[in-house]
Image (cartoon, rainbow, N blue to C red):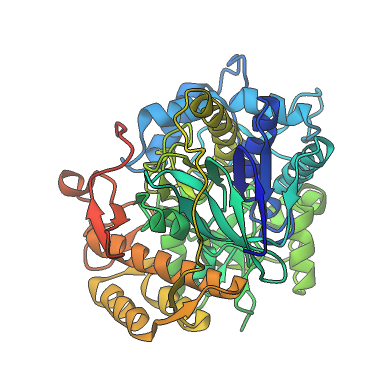
């Protein structure tokens, strides 16, 4: 190996979950090293627009309570949330926001000086706090990055984690990584926290940045961990549509625009959500996305419109990011409706973990979008994601400190490390295949065709570049997602099967859990983190 480094805790990822964990671990006296395969602010957190869903700490708001937030989350998750996990994570919200504000984050305030709150889809009350109008993620990322730098926590930018290393007993011992010049090295640590974000780059159109290539899911699988509920990919209903738009990341039109009164209409000017759900335009995202796709198909269009003209001249001040994206596309949202379509947005499943970030592999922890804690179930409630990263990130750091103190983690050095060779597929082929067959509408015929296409196109390549590492992660995660989607023969949340349109609580009110066997084949299993469903 060309180089090496070591720490008590290695944090992989620099979004809200990873940075929160790093700060808390340093407070607890741990030696922390953070790794980012790109720049510190290149991940999903920066792009989060809407806000953070959190109930007032004193619960004196007559229109809201922790119990109501819990019930809204369980309703959105359509029977697959863990009630204890939901309550525990949401209950930690107020303290997490207090810590974040203590780190320097500045949120929007109302006329009385209290935090301004808006409402988003699936929420029964105004509980979503925000920053810079629609730039909440950017402000959270700024505050956390500044705190990490100010705290002297080392961050290795442009360093890509290739593989998790394990000791003779199977527990984590560090990672194999490569630097900006693709030179291999070893990062030795008895605890590794995966905070790598999502998997949006599985699809041709996504709200996710280029770095969201499902690295954490693939790393965890290859290390022996279990993954759960990968079939539940949330498609954001309202992404700015441009004819013949580029592949990759598309500008998001935050759900908070509908929270302020905007409505969806089709190309004929008729309401899309009228009669579709009691909450109409503020229905959960899976309901809105499905309705948009149906109406677009019925009208022979590739999009519908979001009419926000009723918000008036204050639109630019309330939603500066959205306003700038629209104006760049030649659209004036104050005077004309915004063309929108759905795009891959958030992975509700991931590496199966507890609310403290522990996974089925000793020394491996997960937090943020890469993790499946039981909070989101079959469909994430809007603005619960940043909250989860803040709460679980801190709890994971505390779990690492406790496990180190109790002598549960491996401190033995690993032997010789050899860079692996794994199967990869042309990225454009993979994205086209997944978009066509594993998007909002799925069927056994399409999922089988996608599986055959990817398996048939796979070639083995040494993981000697970042691109090869990402392509291997995308393929392995795509294969796991397709297997989970084929296994779940029903429609639930953001998993919609055209050949099984009904929800089947008798057979499928449970998670789909997979791991790799000793030969590297995906197998369905019931093993994993024990938790009680809603």
* Residue 358 location (% of width, % of height): 44, 36
- Residue 283 in the figure: left or right of residue 188: left
**Splitting the image into 4 quarters, where does residue 375 fall?**
top left
* Total residue callouts: 0
Can the viewer see residue 346?
Answer: no
Residue appearing at x 33%, y 67% in the figure: 482
| Depth check, front residue: 185 or 123 | 185
| Depth check, front residue: 197 or 286 | 197
**Splitting the image into 4 quarters, where does residue 148 fall?**
top right
- Residue 204 in the figure: left or right of residue 489: right
Up-down relation of residue 492 to residue 189 (above or below) = below
Can the viewer see residue 210?
Answer: yes
Up-down relation of residue 364 to residue 90 (above or below) = below
- Residue 258 in the figure: left or right of residue 428: right
* Residue 426 location (% of width, % of height): 49, 83
* Residue 382 location (% of width, % of height): 54, 44
* Residue 186 location (% of width, % of height): 60, 56
Residue appearing at x 80%, y 49% in the figure: 314
| Depth check, front residue: 407 or 164 | 407
**Splitting the image into 4 quarters, where does residue 498 fall?**
bottom left
Q: Quadrant of the N terminus?
A: bottom right
């Amino acid at each position: 190996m060309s180089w090496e480094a070591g720490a008590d805790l290695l944090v992989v990822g620099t979004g809200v979950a990873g940075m929160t964990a790093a700060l808390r671990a340093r407070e607890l006296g741990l030696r922390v090293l953070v790794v980012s395969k790109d720049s510190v602010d290149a991940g999903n957190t920066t792009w989060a627009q809407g806000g953070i869903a959190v109930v007032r700490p004193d619960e004196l708001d007559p229109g809201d309570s922790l119990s109501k937030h819990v019930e809204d989350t369980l309703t959105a998750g359509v029977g697959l949330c863990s009630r204890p996990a939901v309550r525990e994570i949401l209950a930690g919200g107020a303290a997490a926001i207090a810590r974040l504000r203590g780190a320097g984050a500045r949120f929007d305030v109302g006329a009385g000086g209290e935090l301004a709150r808006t409402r988003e889809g699936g929420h029964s009350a105004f509980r979503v706090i925000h920053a810079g109008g629609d730039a909440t993620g950017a402000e959270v990322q700024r505050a956390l990055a500044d705190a990490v730098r100010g705290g002297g926590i080392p961050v290795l930018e442009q360093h890509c984690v290739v593989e998790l290393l394990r000791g003779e007993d199977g527990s984590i011992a560090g990672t194999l990584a490569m630097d900006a010049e693709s030179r291999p090295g070893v990062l030795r640590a008895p605890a590794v926290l995966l905070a790598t974000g999502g998997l949006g780059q599985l699809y041709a159109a996504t709200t996710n940045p280029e770095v969201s290539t499902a690295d954490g899911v693939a790393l965890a699988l290859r290390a022996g961990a279990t993954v759960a509920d990968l079939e539940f990919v949330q498609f954001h209903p309202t992404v700015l549509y441009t004819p013949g738009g580029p592949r990759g990341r598309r500008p998001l039109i935050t759900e908070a625009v509908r929270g302020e009164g905007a409505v969806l209409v089709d190309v004929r000017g008729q309401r899309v959500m009228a009669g579709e759900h009691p909450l109409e335009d503020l229905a959960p995202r899976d309901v809105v996305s499905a309705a948009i796709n149906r109406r677009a198909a019925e009208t022979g269009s590739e999009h519908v419109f979001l009419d926000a003209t009723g918000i008036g001249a204050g639109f630019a001040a309330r939603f500066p990011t959205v306003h700038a994206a629209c104006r760049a596309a030649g659209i004036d949202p104050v005077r004309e409706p915004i063309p929108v379509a759905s795009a891959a947005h958030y992975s509700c499943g991931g590496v199966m973990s507890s609310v403290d970030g522990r996974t089925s592999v000793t020394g491996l922890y997960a937090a943020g979008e890469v993790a499946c804690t039981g909070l989101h179930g079959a469909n994430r409630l809007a603005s619960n994601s940043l909250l989860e990263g803040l709460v679980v990130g801190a709890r994971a750091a505390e779990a690492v400190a406790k496990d180190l103190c109790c002598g549960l983690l491996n401190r033995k050095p690993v032997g010789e490390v050899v860079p692996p060779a794994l199967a990869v597929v042309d990225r454009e082929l993979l994205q086209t295949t997944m978009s066509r067959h594993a998007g909002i509408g799925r069927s056994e015929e399409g999922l089988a065709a996608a599986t055959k296409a990817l398996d048939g196109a796979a070639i083995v390549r040494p993981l000697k570049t970042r691109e090869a590492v990402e392509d291997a992660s995308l393929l392995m995660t795509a294969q796991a997602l397709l297997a989970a989607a084929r296994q779940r023969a029903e429609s639930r949340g953001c998993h919609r099967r055209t050949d099984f349109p009904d929800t089947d609580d008798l057979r499928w009110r449970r998670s789909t859990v997979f791991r790799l066997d000793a030969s590297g084949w995906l197998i369905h299993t019931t093993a994993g983190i024990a938790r009680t469903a809603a």
